[in-house]
Amino acid sequence: MIGLTGGIGSGKTTVAHFIEECGFPVYYSDDRAKTIVNDNESLKVRIKELLGEKAYDENGMYDRKFVANKVFNNNELLQSLNGIIHPAVRIDFEEWVSQQTKYLVFKETALLFELKLNLQCYKSLLVTAQDNLRIKRVMDRDNKTYREVQAIMERQMPEKDKIRIADYIIYNDTNLDDLKEQTERVIFEIE
Ligand code: ATP
C-alpha cells in the first residue's frame, strides 16, 4: 500500500486519476469519509451525541458547515470527532483493500503525515507545487479568494516538512503532460 498525499491544490487527486489510468486501484479516504458520515448509522448516532442533533440537517445529511463552525478553535472537540470518523474510515479501507487483487494499491489521504498514516504504508508519495500555483489552481477550481486558500494552506503541515518525510515526490509545477509522465515514472520506480 502506497500512501498518496499533498496539500490543498497540490494535484494529488489528478495524480490519483493518472494512477488509476495506469491500472492501479486508489482508495480516496477523504471522499469515503464524506460518504461514511451519511451512510453509517451507528456513526451518525455517535456524531449527534458529540455535536448535537444539528450535526445532521432535516434530510438526515451531515451538515459540514455546522460541524466546521462547531469544531473551529475547539481542538478537543475536533479530536473527539476524528476519533469517531477515522476508525470507521480505517475499517472501510480494510474491507476495500481485502477485495483488491493488484500487488500495488494507493491510498489518497490529505492528512497522511499529520495523522502518521505513512507508518502503515509501504512507501509514501507526495505531490507538491509552488504555493502561488496551488493557490491559483484552487481559486480557479473552487471560486475561492486568494486569502481563503492561503488561510487553509497556513493551517496545513509546511511543505518542507512533508518533503523531508516523503519517500517519493512529484513536483507539479508545469503542465498535466509532465505530471502524468512523472506519475508513470514513480510507479515504475516503486514497482
Ligand atoms: P485538494 O486537496 O484541494 O482537493 P488536490 O491536491 O486533490 O486538491 P487537484 O484537485 O488534483 O488537487 O488539483 C487542483 C486543481 O488544479 C484541479 O482543478 C486540477 O485540474 C488543477 N491542476 C492540477 N495540476 C495541474 C497542472 N499541472 N496544470 C494545470 N492544472 C492542474
Image (tube, rainbow, N blue to C red):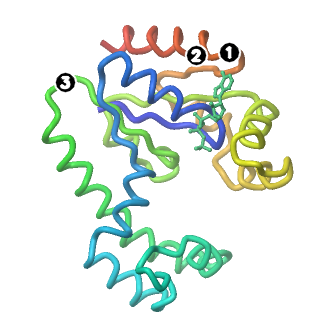
| Residue at disc 2, secondary structure | helix
Of the residues shown, which amino acid type is indicated by label 1?
A: Asn
Disc 1: which residue: 175
Residue 34 higher or lower than 12, as above or below: below
Cα–Cα span, label 3 and label 2: 23 Å
The disc label shown at residue 102, or none? 3
78 and 166: which is toward the camera: 78
Residue 39 higher or lower than 150, as above or below: below
Of the residues shown, which amino acid type is indicated by label 2?
A: Leu
Of the residues shown, which amino acid type is indicated by label 3?
A: Lys
Q: Position of residue 3 (x, y in %)?
A: 40, 35
The structure residue drawn at horizontal position 54% and vertical position 79%, both measured from the top left corner, is 76
- Which badge, 3 or 2, comes first in the chain's sequence? 3
The disc label shown at residue 140, or none? none
Q: Is mark 1 within 8 Å of ligand 1?
A: yes
The structure residue drawn at horizontal position 44% and vertical position 14%, both measured from the top left corner, is 186
Residue 117 higher or lower than 106, as above or below: below
Local packing at callout 3 (Cα closer than 10 Å; few below 14, some 14-19, many 20+) is few
Contact? badges 2 and 1 (CB < 8 Å): yes
- The quarter of the rendered structure image containing the N terminus is top left
Disc 2: which residue: 179
Cα–Cα span, label 1 and label 3: 29 Å
Q: Quadrant of ligand 1?
A: top right
Local packing at callout 1 (Cα closer than 10 Å; few below 14, some 14-19, many 20+) is few
Cα–Cα span, label 2 and label 1: 6 Å
- Which badge, 1 or 3, comes first in the chain's sequence? 3
The structure residue drawn at horizontal position 30% and vertical position 12%, both measured from the top left corner, is 191
Q: Is mark 2 within 8 Å of ligand 1?
A: yes
Q: Position of residue 113 (x, y in %)?
A: 49, 44
